[in-house]
Amino acid sequence: MQLEAFKLVTLYPCLTVVRGGYIRSAQFGANMTINFELSEEQSAIREMANAFAMNEMAPHARKWDEESFFPVETLRQAAALGFGGLYVGDDVGGSGLTRLDAALVFEELAKGCTSTAAYMSIHNMSAWMIDAFGNDDQRQKWLPGLCSMDLFASYCLTEPGAGSDAAALSTKAVRDGDDYILNGAKAFISGGGTSNIYVCMVRTGEAGPKGISCIVVEKDTPGLSFGAQEIKLGWKSQPTAAVIFEDCRVPASNLIGGEGSGFKIAMAGLDGGRINIGACSIGGAQFCLDTAVEYMKERKQFGKAIAEFQALQFRVADMASALEAARLMIWKAAIMVGEKQPGATRMAAMAKKIATDSGFEVANDALQLHGGYGYLRDYPIERVLRDVRVHQILEGTNEVMRLIIARQIFGS
């Protein structure tokens, strides 16, 4: 490695070798450094998240799932560790961490309870949108409570008639003096009916993305109501419901970023959300793989542990390789999005697609390795399988991820 590095330096004087034989460009700065070793701080954050997941989430995950229980107090304990506003500014109670730091946290939390970790991902995305695009009054009003998770947040983009075609949303916000009057409905909203803050994309102008704005609606606002709680395959530890606006009067001061900027805000939020949900998929799948490996060492058939059968060893090798490749893509996308590098949106789409597809496939393979036991609720694999399945749909379906990737490749 070091020899090859020095050869490159000889050919390209703008490059220098740093610790471990890695390459750094003096001309282009730190972004050219390729180093897959986590810092001591990142390792400590990762270990803290893992300890919390194993001690405070994993022992209760089955009960939360079976009872459709939203673990408010556990979420607030997580927030006390800084997980309620991971990449929100520290001046309003956030942790001020990087996107990569957040990806490390979500992967570990998902090992304890994938569904609950995924809600935390959405909460963090919503808080970041206020932090990144809100004015100081808005940041001071909502973010301290969101970072402590005294307040919970939901992201409201999807509508009954506007899913993948998000720019076709029809929820209207009409200016009336110092307020906006909202009419319409949002569908499949995580935290719906429970969250205190709803970060909503609404139509204030012309058709298409340029007529969309972002506004915060607080729970007790007159004219705001909620549909019945959805009965879902997975994600049972977080509430999901329609959010309904009927002549809902919202102060104009709740508008985030100005009229017409909502679609840009929504897409910026989703770039990070895709990384987070991909990390949750990897975490859930890694838990399934680790569980399957331990099971294989104990389970005996034909006179020996099934871990000794080469065909099954090869399957496990493929599962581990798929997760490691997905993890590296998530890390790269996290760095690119955090640093606003060119191509970050495409990389986030690539990483989300690979991570969520691989996550489901690995969880499914882990269930297969358990045989009939994997299909029982006595074992946790089936729960994780149900939880990670929706990751291929939300934050933009994986079909839409392909569309984003292809459009950027072909310049369309």
Image (tube, rainbow, N blue to C red):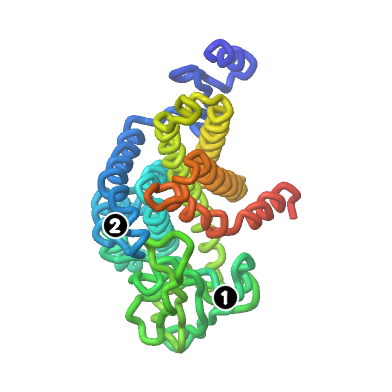
Residue at 56% x, 54% y: name it: 392
Q: Which residue is mark 1?
A: 160
**Marker disc for residue 75:** 2
User: Helix, strand or loop at disc 2?
Assistant: helix
Left or right for 124, reference 340: left
Kind of residue sitting beneath label 1: Pro
Q: Position of residue 35 (x, y in %)?
A: 48, 27
Q: Residue at x 53, y 27 (%)?
A: 313
Residue 167 spot, x, y in % from top left: 62, 69
Residue 310 at least partly seen: yes
The tag earlier along the polypeptide, 2 or 1, is: 2
Separation of residues labelled 2 and 1 (CA atoms): 29 Å
**Would residue 28 be visible to someone looking at this image?**
no
Residue at position x 59%, y 68% in the image: 163
- Quarter of the figure with the C terminus: bottom right
Residue type at numbered disc 2: Leu
Tell me residue 109's x, y (percent). Answer: 36, 47
Residue 1, given in percent of the width and then of the height, sits at 54, 15
Badge 1: residue crowd in 10 Å (few <14, some 14–19, many ≥20): few
Could you tell me which secondary element the residue under label 1 belongs to?
loop
Query: Foreground: 76 or 366?
Result: 366
Q: Nearer the viewer, residue 96 or 358?
A: 358
Q: Is residue 141 left or right of residue 159?
A: left
Above/below status of 389 relative to 218: above
Name the image quarter holding residue 290.
Answer: top left
Return the residue nearer the eye: 298 or 358. Answer: 298
Q: Is residue 344 left or right of residue 100?
A: right
215 or 348, nearer to the observer: 348
Q: Which mark is residue 354?
A: none
